[in-house]
Image (spheres, rainbow, N blue to C red):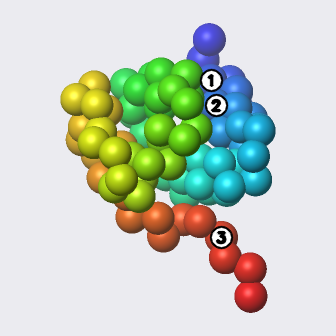
Amino acid sequence: MDHATRLKRLRFRAWHRGTKEADLLIGGFFDTHHAGWSADEAALFEVMLEEQDVDIMAWAMGTLPVPEVYAGTLITELKTLNYVPIAK
């Protein structure tokens, strides 16, 4: 599958996690960062989407240690949490 199609699928999966909190965190992260991803980074994000939402959220907030496979730029950017929209 080409990169553009893969990103469309990833966007859907990122925004349809099952809870509003996970949608905002994971979907917001995808929307903010996907444009600069290489094919390898998109593939790693795709693997991460198979993880439990509570684990991904805990990694982002620093309450659980990050598995070695995800250590690097992806998790560093996930931990910034500056991509989560906050209603005013």
Tag 1 and tag 2, C-beta contact below 8 Å: yes
Mark-to-mark CA distance, 1 and 3: 24 Å
Residue pointed to by mark 2: 10
Q: Which residue is mark 1?
A: 6
In this figure, what is the number of numbered marks?
3
Callout 2: SS: helix
What residue do we see at 41% from left, 26% from top? Answer: 44
Query: Which is more N-terminal, label 2 or label 3?
Result: 2
Q: Nearer the viewer, mark 1 or mark 2?
A: 2
Residue occupying the point 25% across, 37% down: 71
Q: Residue at x 54, y 53 (%)?
A: 29
Give the amino acid type for the residue marked by disc 1 in the picture. Arg
The quadrant of the rendering that contains the C terminus is bottom right
* Secondary element at tag 3: loop
In the picture, the disc for residue 15 is none
Question: Type of residue at label 2?
Answer: Leu
Q: Position of residue 57 (x, y in %)?
A: 50, 48
Measured Cα–Cα span from mark 1 to mark 2: 6 Å
State the image coordinates of residue 42 (x, y, percent, origin top left).
47, 30
Crowdedness near tag 2: few (<14), some (14–19) or many (≥20) residues, C-alpha within 10 Å: many
Is residue 73 left or right of 50 when viewed as pictured?
left
User: What mark, if any, has residue 85 been given in the picture?
Assistant: 3
Q: Nearer the viewer, residue 11 or 54?
A: 54
Q: Is residue 7 left or right of residue 65?
A: right
Mark 3, Cα crowd under 10 Å, few <14 / some 14-19 / many 20+, is few
Q: What amino acid type should be assigned to the residue bearing mark 3?
A: Pro
